Amino acid sequence: LDHARIVLVAGARQVGKTTLVTEVTRPGSPHPMRYLTLDDRATREAAGDDPAGFVTGLDGPAVIDEIQHVPALLLELKRAVDTDAVPGRFLITGSADVLAHRKVIDALPGRIDRIELWPLARTEIEAGERNVIDELLAGRAPQVARAPLGPDAYARAISEGGYPEARRRPAGRLRSRWFRDYLAGTLGKDLLELADLRRADETDRLLRLIAGQSANLLSYRKISQQLELDDKTVKEHTLLLEQLFLIRRLPGWRPGLGAREAARPKAYICDPGLLAHLLGADETRIRTDDQVKGKACETLVLAELLKHASWAEQTVRLFHYQREREDIDFIIENGAGEIAAVEVKAATSIDRRDRRWLERLRDARSERFKAGIVIHSGAQTTPLGDRLWAVPFSGLWT
């Protein structure tokens, strides 16, 4: 707000966007602002009927909550900040990624800073201060001792997820009911506004299918055959689910920049608690069912890396790496081309096979390879060789 004319806080429903922006802009804060929410019907209708008049009538800096309800306001905000370029004019939130629309992207470059707000990170839940992204790119691994062993290391973190309201509910029917209603509202209301898509049942089936294949390479053609839909329709619906912050496509990494564009992405559910709900898996099943355990652990780690990346000191991008026989779950790359690599194993112990691709990547990338870790359910951080470590799951948040 000290530097940007417009700041957008974008994230899924019920992750705390309104709570955050009202705290930041309360009376007496460095940036006090008038607050308006487009969830209010009268406010939404006034903004939709006359976007230009609505923006003109704002007296001073303003918060506009849930702007995806009236995306036409974005172009009026552009006109307003072009007239008066003082920073901190508007703080807006969106539960759908309104900036994904080409018309909006073309209109707002240089005028808006975008901040992604995810469900709570385990670091926040556990009152920690660690940023594992910064540690790895500095060539360090989280040092942990006496961590919980086996499924105790991850099962609860997966089943709870990071949505504040879902976490407050007891495990079982009450939490499952929250996720059910959350998806019904998001796929019913937000999807309709985002794309005027009236076949929400198709998108619901797609979301559940992606959940069952979470952490796998994404094939629109294969999914289209399973759902008996056109592959172009599947791709469009997948992009919509990503704009609603329900899934995340992770691009493939290659040493050469151009080669990355040809690599197939992987698809993940953004929150491990939501994944568990979509799979119909409670904490007991997460502990015992290998078909659930692997994808759930990988989803948990990606969710944490996404959150850490959003407040890391360096700007980074996340990738997966799969090439011929080589397979590494996550690659973290900064603007200097330096990388860190993360492999995820649910087991309590690891062997040479679990680190062989990390070793090969380290040797191939030389000085640009800063650190590689195998996250597992063991008790402590263990060196595995030059710039390689085995790290317990709690190394992401302790």
Image: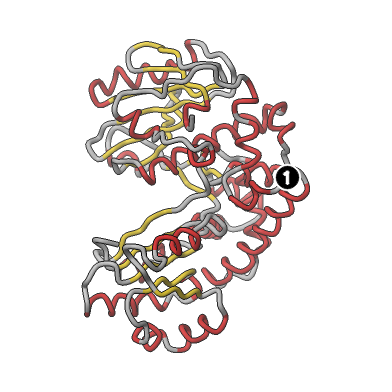
Vertical arrangement, residue 57 with respect to residue 63, above or below: below
User: Which residue occupies 37% across, 34% down?
Assistant: 133
Residue ID for mark 1: 170
Residue 172 vs residue 329, the one in the foreground? 172
Residue 330, given in percent of the width and then of the height, sits at 43, 32
**Residue 232, can we see it?**
no
Which quadrant: the N terminus? bottom left
Residue 344, given in percent of the width and then of the height, sits at 51, 26
Badge 1: residue crowd in 10 Å (few <14, some 14–19, many ≥20): few
Q: Residue furthest front?
A: 28
To which quarter of the image does residue 39 belong? bottom right
User: Which residue occupies 38% across, 89% down?
Assistant: 53
User: Which residue occupies 49% across, 41% down?
Assistant: 124
To which quarter of the image does residue 297 belong? top right
To which quarter of the image does residue 191 belong? bottom right
Colour mapping used in the image: secondary structure
**Residue 21, can we see it?**
yes
Q: Amino acid at mark 1?
A: Pro
Q: Secondary structure at mark 1?
A: loop
Is 265 left or right of 275, judged from the image as shown?
Answer: left
Number of numbered discs overlaid on the protein picture: 1
Residue 66, given in percent of the width and then of the height, sits at 49, 69
Vertical arrangement, residue 7 with respect to residue 171, above or below: below
Residue 79, given in percent of the width and then of the height, sits at 28, 79
